[in-house]
Image: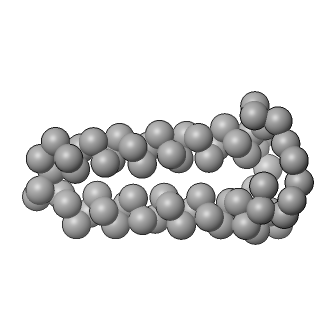
């Protein structure tokens, strides 16, 4: 994690980051498959997901607990 703390691969924070990455990949596939009319929106959503990932990694105090 960005704070230097080591966690296991099945830690909820790592699972969350993996889910975000997978979602971003699916959006990329939609864009590559000819989503030209949605290109601006898909690209914007991908950037938001990327930013969310960075916040989650770098600012552990802003994370909300997963119940």
- Direction from residue 17 to residue 40 in the image, left or right: left
- Direction from residue 23 to residue 56 in the image, left or right: right
Q: Quadrant of the C terminus?
A: top right
Residue beneath the point at 75% across and 31% down: 10
The percent position of residue 4, horizontal first and vertical second, equals 86, 59
Is residue 62 visible from the viewing direction of this image? Answer: no
- Direction from residue 58 to residue 38 in the image, left or right: left
- Direction from residue 61 to residue 57 in the image, left or right: left
Is residue 14 visible from the viewing direction of this image? Answer: yes
The percent position of residue 54, horizontal first and vertical second, equals 62, 64
Q: Name the one closer to the observer, 16 or 7.
A: 7
The percent position of residue 42, horizontal first and vertical second, equals 28, 58
Q: Name the one closer to the observer, 16 or 33.
A: 33
Total residue callouts:
0
Residue beneath the point at 22% across and 50% down: 31
Above or below, 35 against 49 in this view is above
Q: Quadrant of residue 25?
A: top left
Q: Quadrant of the N terminus?
A: bottom right
Above or below, 7 against 55 in this view is above
* Colouring scheme, one of rainbow, by chain, secondary structure, one colour: one colour
The percent position of residue 34, horizontal first and vertical second, equals 12, 47
Residue beneath the point at 16% across and 42% down: 33
Residue beneath the point at 77% across and 62% down: 2
Residue reaching furthest to the right: 5
Q: Quadrant of residue 29?
A: top left
Q: Name the one closer to the observer, 49 or 29.
A: 29
């Amino acid at each position: 994690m960005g704070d230097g703390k080591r966690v296991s691969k099945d830690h909820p924070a790592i699972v969350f980051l993996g889910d975000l990455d997978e979602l971003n990949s699916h959006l990329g596939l939609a864009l590559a498959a000819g989503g030209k009319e949605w290109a601006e929106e898909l690209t914007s959503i991908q950037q938001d997901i990327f930013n969310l990932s960075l916040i989650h990694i770098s600012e552990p105090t802003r994370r909300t607990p997963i119940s």
